[in-house]
Image: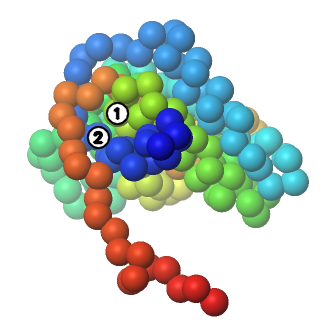
Amino acid sequence: MSDVLQAIAERSSTRGYTDQKLTKEELDRLIEAGLQAPTAANKQEIHISVVDGAHPVLAEIEAVKNDLRGLSNLPHNFYFEAPTVLILSGDAGFSWSKVDAGIAVENISLAAEGMGLGSLIIGCVKDALSGDKKEYFARALQFPEGYEYEIAIAVGHKAVTKVPHEYSVEKNVSYV
């Protein structure tokens, strides 16, 4: 089996990370994987904000997310204490940015798996990053002008492992 197919088969969402920071080389490889993703009309509009897991803006996002959902005292934050969170934003006026960001984040996720790292693709903060504090968070995360949150991914060294999910070709595939 090719390395790519193996990474696809073995990848699962990581919800527990060691304290070990990513090296510059690891981070550079992940960013390159995201930027190498195809984009509609080759627009290449996806922007990646690299956020250290200890950065206070992540706690602010967590607080807004929890407030919007009426949650408190959760055992983990939205990125499960990963040492690095990559937040992808896209051109708000380009209708394909959501798709392009999804492709980029999948590239990052598979690259992480191939490198022996864990990852967690994150959508749960969309309301927090699109609500009343949208402009504040866009500035704090250094989104380019006219860009908005699309998706995020937590990345780090795995402290826990999980068996990849099962699937059913019969249920989920139609041959037309």
In the picture, the quarter occupied by the C terminus is bottom right
Which label number is shown at residue 14? 2
Position of 46 with respect to 134 (left or right) is right
Picture coordinates of residue 105, whole percent (x, y): 55, 44
- Quadrant in which residue 14 is drawn: top left
Picture coordinates of residue 18, whole percent (x, y): 23, 21
Picture coordinates of residue 11, whole percent (x, y): 37, 44
Q: Name which residue lies at 31% across and 23% down.
A: 157
- For label 2, the crowd category at 10 Å Cα-Cα, with few meaning under 14, some 14 to 19 and many 20 or more, is many
Residue that numbered label 1 is attached to: 118
Q: Name which residue lies at 44% across and 54% down.
A: 123
- Identity of the amino acid at label 1? Gly
First of labels 2, 1 by sequence position: 2
Position of 29 with respect to 152 (left or right) is right
> What is the residue that sits farthest to the front in this orientation?
1
| Labelled pair 2, 1 in contact (Cβ < 8 Å) | yes
